Amino acid sequence: MAEIQLRNVSKRWGTFVGVDNFDLTIADREFLVLLGPSGCGKTTTMRMIAGLEDPTEGQITIGGKVVNDLEPKDRDVAMVFQSYALYPNMNVYENIRFPLKVRGVDPTTHDDKVRRASAMVELDEFLDRKPAELSGGQRQRVALARAIVREPNVFLMDEPLSNLDAKLRVSTRAQIKNLSHELAVTTIYVTHDQIEAMTLADRVVVMQKGVVQQVGSPTEIYDRPANTFVASFIGSPAMNLIDGEMTGGSFSAPHTRIDGLAAADGAVTLGFRAEDAQVAEGGQITAPIYTLELLGDATMVTVRIRGALVSVKADKSFRAQIGETVSIRIPTDHCHLFDAATGARIG
Ligand code: ATP
């Protein structure tokens, strides 16, 4: 069992708060993704779990054991980082075997373990090569195999795909997903890429400025973002957000009037996703087209409301001129409402 608990864990440097009161139980074998913009505290959280950084406050347990005072090497976690330092003079086989030697694992088991780990990441043919003779993706897989070979209870991965090109990212991402399932280890994965988070995670933790904004399955976070930060961070394009006023169940903003919404009168931010709305006559937004983008499978039509870009996916055959008036229809059950002052979800 490798359930991980973080109990009110904070990290401060002087008065600067890197991670603020992080409190979460990560289930045994769960794939948890920490997601957020640069500097939000993802890596610091990970480093505290690994033992590379001491929490200023709070308790961390792994498999029911408090690890605050344990050295990284005694925590039974294996790490894969963005910069995977392979030993240049060792070949792939020796690189993968290295953690077994360091940890004093019975030498008669090494060959079997190395071959099994390298087969899992499809490196069997490259065991004699030096790192310099490998592609970026192959090097990344050596780093993965080096983590796998240790048979840890916990995998910690910090942006392990960020040095790969777009195509390799997709295939290595699929491999990581498959491996974590096959190896049945608890995995914590750090990324600022929301697509990586959505495709890999059992649960996603969205962070901003050291503070957890929402914890949930990818679907929960996509369908019911807890606040405007999460709404604007998840999804491509991000959720459309329009500042306006609620009066008697109707939302109004420039070019916009949406009836039949359940929220109290006052200032609100209305959100909806591009794919949930249509270009159709009699819609609740009527505004001049600001830009049109051909996406292949659809045409993205964008208008501007109070300076904010508001996009909707139209049919790929949709043609119009910039400046022409377009009508956008938004089903009210796809409207999200947020408090204008705090950004918190209200409906
Ligand atoms: P990135 O995606 O850019 O790696 P991150 O979310 O992983 O970002 P962290 O590396 O956890 O962010 O850093 C969180 C905050 O803590 C940042 O503002 C960073 O500048 C600050 N920080 C990190 N290490 C230290 C340190 N040793 N001393 C002071 N501040 C630090």
Image: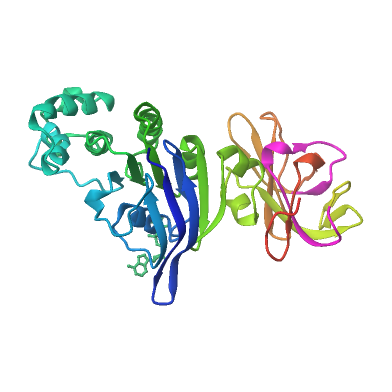
User: Quadrant location of ligand 1?
Assistant: bottom left
Q: Give the image quarter of residue 300.
A: top right
Q: Is residue 136 left or right of residue 179?
A: left
Quarter holding the N terminus? top left
Q: In the displayed orientation, state which residue is furthest to the right.
A: 248
Residue 114 lies in quadrant: top left
Q: In the rendered view, would you say 260 is above or below 130?
A: below
| Residue at (44, 50) in percent of width and height | 5
70, 239: nearer the viewer: 70
Using residue 29 as the reference point, say whether residue 116 is left or right of it: left
Q: Position of residue 294 (x, y in %)?
A: 61, 36
Residue 92 placement (x, y as % from top left):
14, 33
* Residue for point 74% across, 39% down: 277
Q: Residue visible at 8% across and 32% down?
A: 107
**Residue 160 seen:** no
Instruction: Say left or right for 150 vs 93.
Output: right
User: How many circles with numbers are drawn on the protein?
Assistant: 0
Quarter of image, res 143: top left
Q: How is the image coloured?
A: rainbow
**Residue 106 or residue 319, whichever sits in front:** 106
User: As displayed, is residue 19 above or below residue 331?
Assistant: below
Residue 277 falls inside the magenta stretch = yes
Q: Is residue 34 magenta?
A: no
Is 61 left or right of 290, judged from the image as shown?
left
Q: Give the camera-side residue of 66 and 205.
A: 66
Up/down of 241 relative to 236, above or below: below
Q: Position of residue 70 (x, y in %)?
A: 27, 56
Rendered location of residue 21, percent (x, y): 49, 62
Q: Is residue 251 visible?
A: yes
Span shown in magenta = 263-288
Give above or below for 288 relative to 59: above
